[in-house]
Image (cartoon, grey):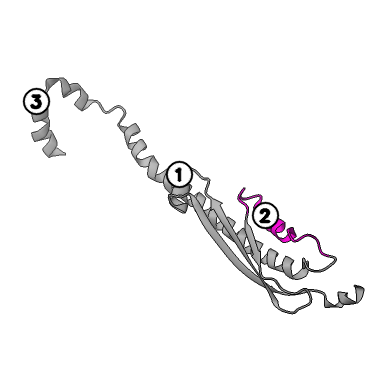
Amino acid sequence: MTFFRRRLRPALLLADPRCAPLQSDQRGALMVEFAIAILPVLITFFGTVQWCACAYVNLIVHHGAFVASRCMAVVHPQMPDSGPETDCTDAVNTLLALSTKDKATVTSTAVAATSEQVAQTTVELNYTCTVPLGNVVACGAGRKLAMKAQASYPNQGSSYQKIWY
């Protein structure tokens, strides 16, 4: 700083005498420093918020895979007293309804109603990141994050129901 005061400042003043009042004016310096410093702070904060939202939705997708596999094993669509085949997909999308408007895709392996095989289910969701500034940090330039979860559950198909039909 002393070098500037002794050597450069007189040289600047001699170069253009109209700049002398501007060099001593410090008004607005704090606003400029704030504008430079606030952007990284906001990006970090909103990126953390978006990352937490992604982690929460990923947890819901994993739980949805468990719910769908249990649904396919207990409330089996091939049984005569079961509901429609879309019940399991609707259950997963109901779980996700509070956290995202995106719909999940549920795929299951076909297991016979009376077998003791393991019912496997895959839930896929293309989550749209919605937090401003944070969506680019947490989800990349596409602002979408593909989530996938698999779960299995032993088939609980009621073989005793054969006596009813």
Give, as a single range, the part of the protein colored magenta. Answer: 82-103
Percent position of residue 96, x then y: 65, 54
Circle 3 residue: 15
**Secondary element at image label 2:** helix
Image location of residue 67, percent across then percent down: 69, 64
Q: Position of residue 163 (x, y in %)?
A: 91, 77
Q: Are discs 3 and 2 less than 8 Å apart at CB? A: no
Estimate how packed mark 3 is, as few (under 14), some (14 to 19) or many (20 or more) residues with alpha carbons within 10 Å. Answer: few
Q: CA distance from mark 1 to mark 3?
A: 44 Å
In what quadrant of the picture does the C terminus appear? bottom right
| Residue at image mark 1 | 133
- Dot 2 crowding, Cα within 10 Å, few <14, some 14–19, many 20+: many
Quadrant containing the N terminus in the rendered view = top left
Q: Amino acid at mark 1?
A: Leu
Residue 121: say if magenta.
Answer: no
The reply to whether discs 1 and 3 touch (Cβ–Cβ < 8 Å) is: no
Label 1 vs 3, first from the N-terminus: 3
- Judge left or right: residue 156 versus residue 12: right
Q: Earlier in the sequence, mark 3 or mark 2?
A: 3
- Rounded to the nearest whole Å, what is the CA distance between mark 3 and mark 2? 71 Å
Residue tagged by mark 2?
93
Sequence order check: which comes first, mark 2 or mark 1? Answer: 2
**Amino acid identity at mark 2:** Asn
